[in-house]
Image (spheres, helix red, strand yellow):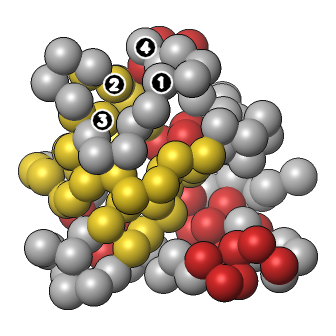
Amino acid sequence: MSEFDIWNHRPSTGYRQGVDLVGYKVEATDGSIGKIDRHSEDVGSSYLVVDVGAWIFGRRVLLPAGTIELIDTAERKVYVDRTKEQIKAAPDFDEAKQGGEPGYLEQFARYYGQPHM
């Protein structure tokens, strides 16, 4: 269990409300994993949806905002604190379920290590 909320941006990342992260490259601890396809700023439920299509054909994964270590706006890159293998093993993101299924984010919270309240 970490000392920060997995669903909110850490103050040390350099994130500023309103910055559009769509299109930024995402770097895992061991290399590039894809580009941000979608970004939510919802308080208590902030996350990124990353298109890892070049790496795993046609797949999108959800990364809670708390996994972000650093945002480099000059390079348009977001660095996360997970490995490629950890991201590869994450549950698939399903946009249809995300909008209408209660508790949908809970599976991601469990996987990434913190209950979603």
Residue toward you, 17 or 90: 17
Residue at the location (83% across, 81% down)? 101
Query: What x and y, as percent, mark residue 72?
Result: 25, 21
Among the two numbered marks 2 and 1 on one chain, the one whose residue lies closer to the N terminus? 1
Q: Name the residue under label 4.
A: 14
Query: Are the residues tagged 4 and 3 within 8 Å (C-beta)?
Result: no
Crowd rating for badge 1 (residues with CA inside 10 Å; few <14, some 14–19, many 20+): few
Among the two numbered marks 4 and 3 on one chain, the one whose residue lies closer to the N terminus? 4
Check disc 3 and give the amino acid type: Val
Disc 1 vs disc 4: which is toward the camera? 1
Disc 2 vs disc 1: which is toward the camera? 1
Cα separation, mark 1 vs mark 4, equals 10 Å
Q: Name the residue under label 3.
A: 78
Q: Vertically, is 5 above or below 15?
A: below
Residue at the location (76% across, 72% down)? 99
Q: Which corner quadrant holds the N terminus?
A: top right
Q: Name the residue under label 2.
A: 71
Residue toward you, 1 or 38: 38
Check disc 4 and give the amino acid type: Gly
Residue 37 visible in image = yes
Query: What x and y, as percent, mark residue 96?
Result: 66, 84
Asked if residue 45 lies left or right of residue 30, the reply is right
Say which mark, if any, is on residue 19. 1
Crowd rating for badge 2 (residues with CA inside 10 Å; few <14, some 14–19, many 20+): many
Among the two numbered marks 3 and 2 on one chain, the one whose residue lies closer to the N terminus? 2
Residue toward you, 105 or 3: 105
Query: What x and y, as percent, mark residue 35?
Result: 26, 54
Query: Are the residues tagged 4 and 2 within 8 Å (C-beta)?
Result: yes
Cα separation, mark 3 vs mark 2, equals 5 Å
What element does badge 3 sit on?
strand
Query: What x and y, as percent, mark residue 37?
Result: 38, 58
Check disc 2 and give the amino acid type: Ile
